[in-house]
Amino acid sequence: MVFVFNGWDHNGLIRQNNKGMEALEQTMKYKEGTLPGDLIVIKSKILEIKDKLIRFYHAMYNADTETKVATAELIAIHYT
């Protein structure tokens, strides 16, 4: 179980405009295991945006049982 953002800048706008984001802190909590083949749903929300900081929250659910299996909270810095 890994929360990954690879490829989210599909049009290359971040690189073209010299913008970026780096994670400063990440807290993950595993609540229940999953098995290969389990369908997983990830729900995300932005908790807070400040001058240069942004806080995200992600929750991973087993789609069949609707059980929350993991959470992640990230604090990142965004820059130009």
Image (spheres, helix red, strand yellow):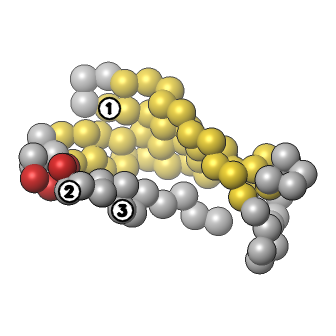
Mark 3: which amino acid? Gly
Query: Which residue in the protein does label 2 denote?
Result: 12
Query: Which residue in the protein does label 1 denote?
Result: 53
Residue 76 percent location from the top left of the image: 36, 42
User: Circles 1 and 2: CB distance less than 8 Å?
Assistant: no
User: Circles 2 and 3: CB distance less than 8 Å?
Assistant: no
Q: Can residue 79 be seen here?
A: yes
Q: Which of 15/79 is in front? A: 15
What secondary structure is marked by label 2?
Answer: loop
What secondary structure is marked by label 3?
Answer: loop
Query: Which residue in the protein does label 3 denote?
Result: 7
Q: Look at 29% across and 54% down and name the residue there.
A: 9
Residue 40 percent location from the top left of the image: 72, 58
Q: How many marks?
A: 3
Residue 48 percent location from the top left of the image: 44, 24
Position of residue 35 relative to residue 62, above or below, is below
Q: Which of 6/78 is in front? A: 6
Which of the 4 image quadrants contains residue 8?
bottom left
Q: Which of 73/63 is in front? A: 63
Q: Residue furthest bottom?
A: 36
Q: Give how far apart the Cα atoms at labels 3 and 1 are.
A: 21 Å
Q: Which of 24/50 is in front? A: 50
Task: Please indicate whether residue 17 sits to the left or right of residue 63 in the image.
Answer: left
Mark 1: which amino acid? Leu
Q: Residue furthest right?
A: 65
Which one is earlier in the sequence, the residue at label 3 or at label 1?
A: 3
Which one is earlier in the sequence, the residue at label 1 or at label 2?
A: 2
Quarter of the figure with the N terminus: bottom right
Q: Can residue 29 be seen here?
A: no
Position of residue 53 relative to residue 58, above or below, is above
